[in-house]
Image (cartoon, rainbow, N blue to C red):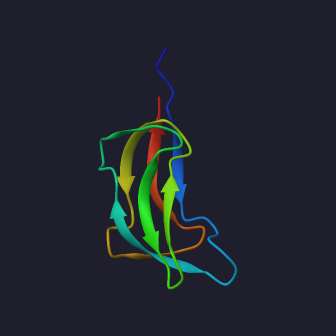
């Protein structure tokens, strides 16, 4: 039987009242790296503050959709983690 893998998106969450977008300052991991649920994967910056976004699942970072310096809106998928 073939193993089933699921994907967990890394999504830009709501960061505060009136904040609708953020800029990706730096990725703490690269595609192919193993990540652990609860570990910081990306740092984002708004006009009000800097935030770290944590992985919501343990697995392998499979893709990054917003590069460093890129802008994302709340709810946008920044990357995908493939769970074993």
In the visual, does 67 lie left or right of 7? Answer: left
> From the viewer's perspective, is residue 2 above or below residue 73?
above
In x, y percent, where is residue 46?
50, 79
Of 71 and 51, which appears nearest the observer? Answer: 51
> From the viewer's perspective, is residue 17 above or below residue 68?
below
In x, y percent, where is residue 5?
49, 32
Of 45 and 34, which appears nearest the observer? Answer: 45
Total labels drawn: 0
Residue at the spot 37% in from the left edge and 46% down from the top edge: 62
* Residue farthest to the right, as pictured: 17
Residue at the spot 47% in from the left edge and 22% down from the top edge: 3
In x, y percent, where is residue 48?
54, 83
Q: Which of the 4 quarters of the picture holds residue 13?
A: bottom right
Residue at the spot 36% in from the left edge and 70% down from the top edge: 25
> From the viewer's perspective, is residue 38 above or below residue 71?
above
In the visual, does 84 lie left or right of 30? Answer: right
Residue at the spot 36% in from the left edge and 52% down from the top edge: 63
* Residue farthest to the front, as pictured: 49
In x, y percent, where is residue 4?
51, 27
* Residue farthest to the top, as pictured: 1
């Amino acid at each position: 039987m073939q193993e089933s893998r699921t994907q967990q998106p890394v999504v830009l969450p709501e960061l505060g009242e009136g904040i609708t977008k953020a800029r990706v300052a730096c990725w703490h991991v690269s595609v192919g790296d193993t990540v652990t649920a609860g570990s910081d994967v990306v740092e984002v910056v708004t006009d009000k503050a800097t935030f770290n976004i944590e992985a919501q699942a343990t697995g392998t970072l499979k893709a990054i959709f917003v590069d460093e310096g890129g802008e994302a809106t709340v709810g946008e998928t920044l990357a995908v983690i493939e769970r074993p």
